[in-house]
Image: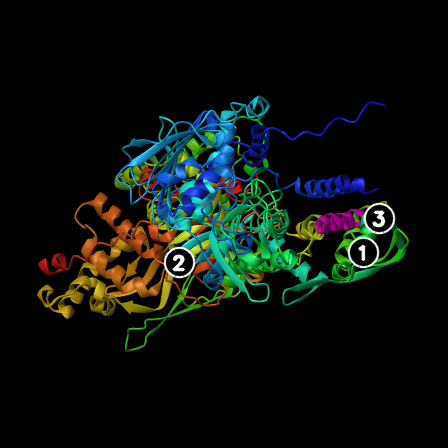
Amino acid sequence: MSEAPIIKKLEETVINRIAAGEVIQRPANALKELIENSLDAKSTNIQITVKNGGLKYIQIQDNGVGIRKDDFSIVCERFTTSKLQKFEDLSSISTYGFRGEALASISHVAHLTIQSKTASEKCAYRAQFIDGKLNGPPKLIAGNQGTQIIVEDLFYNMNVRKRALKSASEEYQKIADVVGKYAIHNASVGFSLKKFGENNDIRTPVGSNQTDNIRTIYGNSIARELTEFSLEDDKYKFKANGQMTNVNYSTKRMNFLLFINHRLVECQSLKKSIDQVYTNYLPKNMHPFIYLSLKLDPKNVDVNVHPTKHEVHFLNEEQIVEIITAAVEKKLLGCNNSRVYFTQAKLPIVTSNTIQSSPKEKSEKVYPKELVRTDSSNQKLEKFFGATTKKMETMQITDRNDDDNVDNKVVTNPEDKLFEERNKQFLIDNEKFESKLLNKTIEHSPSPKKKMKTDVGFNPVGGVVLSRTKELEVTTVECELTSVLELRKKIEGNCHPAMRELFNQHVFVGCIDPSQALIQHGTKLYMCNTQQIMEELFYQFVMYNFQNFGIISFSDPLSVKKLALEALKLPETGWTPEDGDKNELAEKVTEILTEKGEMLKEYFTLEIDENGDLKTLPLLLDKHVPEMTGLPMYLLRLATEVNWESELECFETFARETAKYYSFIEENDSDEKHNWKWLVEHVFYPAIKDFFLPPKSFINNAAIVELANLPNLYKVFERC
Amino acid sequence: MFDLKTDVNGVLDELYSAKCKNYEMICPILLPLGINQASAITFSKHIFNEITVIGSVDKKFVVVYAKLKKLLIIIDQHAAHERVRLEMLMNEYTHQEIEEVTFKQSKLKKTIPLKLSSDEVRCLSSKDVNNHFRKLGVSYNLQGNCMDIVAVPTCLYNNVFENVDTEKDKLLKLFVSSFIKEEFDFLKNSRCFSKTIPNFLNKIINHEACRGAIKFGDVLTTEACQNLVQSLSLCKLPFQCAHGRPTMVPLTNMRKMPPKVERQKVNLKKLKAL
């Protein structure tokens, strides 16, 4: 058995170095102590410069009260402080420091230089310290109000510690973390941090606020999702306030800034409990950002439990944690707002590049986000319900402005066969589409039409009777007018093939209002200007059905003059006394139109008899009757806007005006089966799908715009 | 035996991903597209008062229009229904009083014995801990260092018995043991009782909400879309699904659409000139 070793007292420097090693564990600890000293000295601006992660050099410059010249000799000795006088003061401590340990510890593990000027001194003093003692007397030097402390070669005499802290960037990260947190908590104090010889990494202005500082330091993605909270509890005597992110923000590592009585500390129980609250609302393994400043009665806090002071004990911890957690959850659920989204500032316009013809790569893997679930050839059941009832319907149209209250019955008759026949031509396989498309545009023009007519006196009761009359009356007129053929050619030449495919294979989504609707094609969602498109389509119908229109006939012919008078009353006409007497103008309208009556009847099935009464209108699209409210204006514009002089221009302008009139739909929120929504979805878009030849001008005039595509939507909805 | 915890989470995850595989991929979170402060849009619950359904896109999303804000919004039909179901299930499985949630419980046909460590036995002797487990819907008899579980939260029970085909008892035991273990862990770490719903139960209810929800590819009629939006508007947190993903995202602001082209005025002069 060996002899018991003798107990000796350690040398003073060894004791101090061991103690210092406990207080100063890494550069960030040293800096934290120095920042706290600066804050205790009531500084409003603190500048920090760091070299090599703080291992080589830390400089902190403040504008606080400074250190008096007489105190230089003992400022770095252990247990010297200006902040605490007797032990009892600890229970009501409101400064950061209280032990008189920080500078002493630093001076034992690094080369320390202090330069300071107080308000009463004329100039600054500078001194160097080694192991808690002055190294030579303080020297006079020019300097600003406040204290500058330089810590060089940290841990120069502790090789093991120095080697353990080998990554300068990691240490710098920790320093930046500490500075950032203090900058947020002491928002009124300006902070700046930079690497030696580089630009500021952190810079907060003097007199800033917490939200702004969080934005500067942690970024806008956190700052814009912040919610402020505060609570007070009388029972346990504490106040808490801070900033928390709402459920829209989440990050992989929890960012929890906790200050208890202004001390940056850690509290595992509080952190865990708050995180637990968030797990129920955030995506898996994601965490929030929280800044919490807790003010407890100093009597209830024991700050002296850890050498680096980063842990404190306080009374009633369980209850306080519980109260705070409950408050956080309540606040979290109170956040009714959605997160912030960014819509495209500028609307993308469809270009020929974005619309690609059917993809040819077959071997490529199809991701779910690219998988299109709808089929453009699908039809909805509602369509058929609508069609059958429509047949039985007799529309009652009242000219609301007419005092005579003339009731005009308009009877339309659907001709399904005609459409089915043309439909067949357009049932195109995806693969063969391209080649067919070329034929299509040409095929389309001279396709034989059947002429059908419905008389007023004839009451369409049953399909059987109808179909018989159809066959009897079928006559097809080939159009041989060069002007019409020329106009048709123009339409075909102007057709955008890729957009043609888009319209041909679209899936209808829904209407926003009578003039806007959404369609889907492939993985893309488009918004279409229904009215603009229908105007083009009706124009094309007029051209291609030239001389072969169906008939909408009025049970009681309408006086053109009366209608023209109505039109002149409308404010949009812009009639002024200078334009002449309304009656005279109306006479002129009747005159012009009656004169052209024969031509209009033959070519466009628009019949005006010799008495100047309107008897029929052309049926451009099955199941569609134009809005009667627009009829007066239509007739007026026919008289004024159509160029009756030259053949080609006459047809073109007539078709334009007609198309404009027919494409107008009124928004009436009736619950009828065949309100405008039904019309747009089940009459307009199927017709667009089958017959429309989109002009190239659509690329630029926002008639169709791309809103979104499936891969992007998957991204926004965080599906992959 | 408590080492099984990781496995149980694995089982849950597997169940979840297997169900989701057909219509979604679980991937990391991405920020919303393109950052442009000028057009930042956020909306509150009030938005639901002005919403009309426009239609369904690709059997995946529902497009709606907020008339007053002139905002076109797109809703993820699965995420939205998941949220609706989650809140419905929460109501079904718990009694919610002011700041206190109590889980309903289901009696077990056969008790599940759990061996406890001495720490845990000591923990159970506290009245607060007893109370805590009662609120979570767990009933038990303590015999020495063995906890005989008599009843478990209904959500946990249902999840095992209504949805798993084989080895129900084994899975139930696994679930129960890891659930209790997690609670002990939490009590030890935080030294206090959380009033929030335990992670494990939350996960189970989330899973159930997801499983029963409308999937991508399910055809929704306009009425179904309207119902979905209506029930979403009644949710406490309508803007995110059970897994924290957004349920609805604005597509575009219609105010930014180009204005309508005005029609040319009628040329009355031409008439007069005749």
Q: From which residue to which does the magenta span run?
A: B176-188
Residue B50 in picture, x, y percent from top left: 45, 63
The alpha-carbon separation of the residues under discs 1 and 2 comes to: 56 Å
- Going by the image, does B157 lie left or right of A445? right
Name the element at disc 1: helix
Task: Check the image and report above or below for A387 versus A95.
Answer: below
Residue B69 image label? 2
Q: Is the residue B85 above or below the residue A428 in the image?
A: below
Around disc 1, counting alpha carbons within 10 Å, would you say few (fewer than 14), some (14 to 19), or many (20 or more)? some
The residue that disc 3 covers is B118
- N-terminal-most mark, 1 or 2: 2
Q: Are marks 1 and 2 in contact (CB under 8 Å)?
A: no
| Label 2: which secondary element | loop
Mark 3 is surrounded, within 10 Å at the Cα level, by few (under 14), some (14 to 19) or many (20 or more) other residues, namely: few
The label number, if any, that marks residue B124 in the structure image: 1
Q: Categorize mark 2 by other alpha carbons within 10 Å: few (<14), some (14-19), many (20+).
A: some
Please name the predominant secondary structure of the magenta segment in the image.
Answer: helix
* Kind of residue indicated by mark 3: Ser
